[in-house]
Amino acid sequence: MGIDRRDFLKMMGASAAAALGGLVVVEDIMKDIALASKSSSKPGAHSTSRLAMVIDVQKFKTEADYERVINACHSIHNVPDIGNPKNEVKWIWTDTFEHTFPEQQEEAHMQESLKELPFVLLCNHCENPPCVRVCPTKATFKREDGIVMQDMHRCIGCRFCMAACPYGSRSFNWKDPRPYIKNENPDYPTRMRGVVEKCTFCVERLAEGLEPACVEASKGAMIFGDITDPNSEVRKVLNEAYTIRRKPELGTGPNIYYVIGGTNNA
Amino acid sequence: MYNGGKIIFGIFVFVALAAYPVYNNIGKATVEPEPKIDTPAIQKLSEKKCVESKEFMKAEHMVLLNKWRDLAVRDGQRVYVASDGQRYTISLQNTCMNCHSNKKEFCDKCHDYAGVKPYCWDCHVAPKEGDHGDR
């Protein structure tokens, strides 16, 4: 069965109209894509502040100084003390110079005292956080003020973020953490088995106008504030002292700065 | 039919067992759950009202909680402005449970009745319920 000339022309007309309509839709989609890429090209482009921390390594003199800071954080946030390093959950911890700044190992004849010094480590709240990029559920995300935040309600425990983080800032709850919390803080939630947790720069305290718990407990060894504010204390410290960051060559843009040297060496 | 008597007897037993919940509850009125609100914190309130109206909270509290969760965690906004203009701190543990410190007599009453198991308490710390349901 063939088609006659009249039907053929009708079909031509109909398909031409459909194609034109399709073009309009495609154009709209392209516009949307262009808009989306414009707004997301720079993470946190709309934000006005950038929260950062400076840690003055030389002001941590004794074991008690570290413990005070770590306990302040872990007790407030119901971080369990499991004991076994394989199941360890930590928001703030210490490690050696060698592990903290591996790229600085070329400095073979540097100040010897530094090599034994433990360094306080926590989430770097990166400018370009790899953990956020890999999270399949957007459970971890970057707030406009720069904090890399974790939404426990969304975390499915895939641990991609742990693999992505070059600083080891994230811990997985292999077991129910509740039995391992010595003194449960009734004002803050715990976590459940199967989620990843890390430091949140104390968002709940910042909302009340308080400083992060570690900063408060550090007696001036840790300084916290908005790095874009020229009058902030962090800005002033950064202007005065030479600081280094952990693994800046990876391009994550860490926001924790370490003052290493100083005239009053321990 | 082979073994007809046994089969019919078996069917009868099966129907009797399967239908047990139906005829056991026929004609019985189920006791409606009555969540209690007589906690010390609520007693102290001059006007006994929740964040929103009682009817709204009864039907939509889970919607409000989801909204609160997103506001606090994702948007960093920790103050809720109720429909009457009153401001509340967004916190399940510190706002809701501060008044409703009797989780067993309040939350669990309806949730058990309706057979729902909200996973809030996997992480959020429920108030310690002592002698008077106050923490």
Image (tube, grey):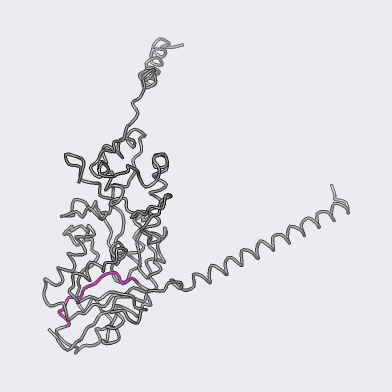
Give the camera-side residue of A146 and B41.
Answer: B41
Query: Residue A117 in the image: x percent, y percent?
Result: 16, 78
Give the camera-side residue of B90 and A261.
Answer: B90
Q: In this picture, is A116 found above or below A154?
A: below
Query: Residue A2 in the image: x percent, y percent?
Result: 85, 49
Q: Is residue A117 magenta?
A: yes
Give the camera-side residue of A124 and B35.
Answer: B35
> For the view shown, which residue lies furthest in the right direction?
A5
> For the view shown, which residue lies furthest in the top direction?
B5
Please name the residue shown 41% across and 60% down the image.
A138
Query: How many numbered discs, if any?
Result: 0
Left or right position of A115 against B69: left
Q: Quadrant of the C terminus of chain A?
A: bottom left
Please name the residue shown 17% across and 89% down the image.
A263
Query: Residue B26 in the image: x percent, y percent?
Result: 39, 18
Left or right position of A5 against B83: right
Quarter where residue A226 is shown:
bottom left
Please name the residue shown 76% across and 57% down the image.
A15
Quarter where residue A204 is shown:
bottom left
> For the view shown, which residue lies furthest in the front direction?
B46
Left or right position of A23 against A237: right
Quarter where residue A148 is shown:
bottom left
Q: Is residue A110 magenta?
A: no
Q: In this picture, is B40 found above or below A220?
A: above
Q: What range of the chain is rendered magenta?
A: A114-125
Query: Residue A47 in the image: x percent, y percent?
Result: 43, 72
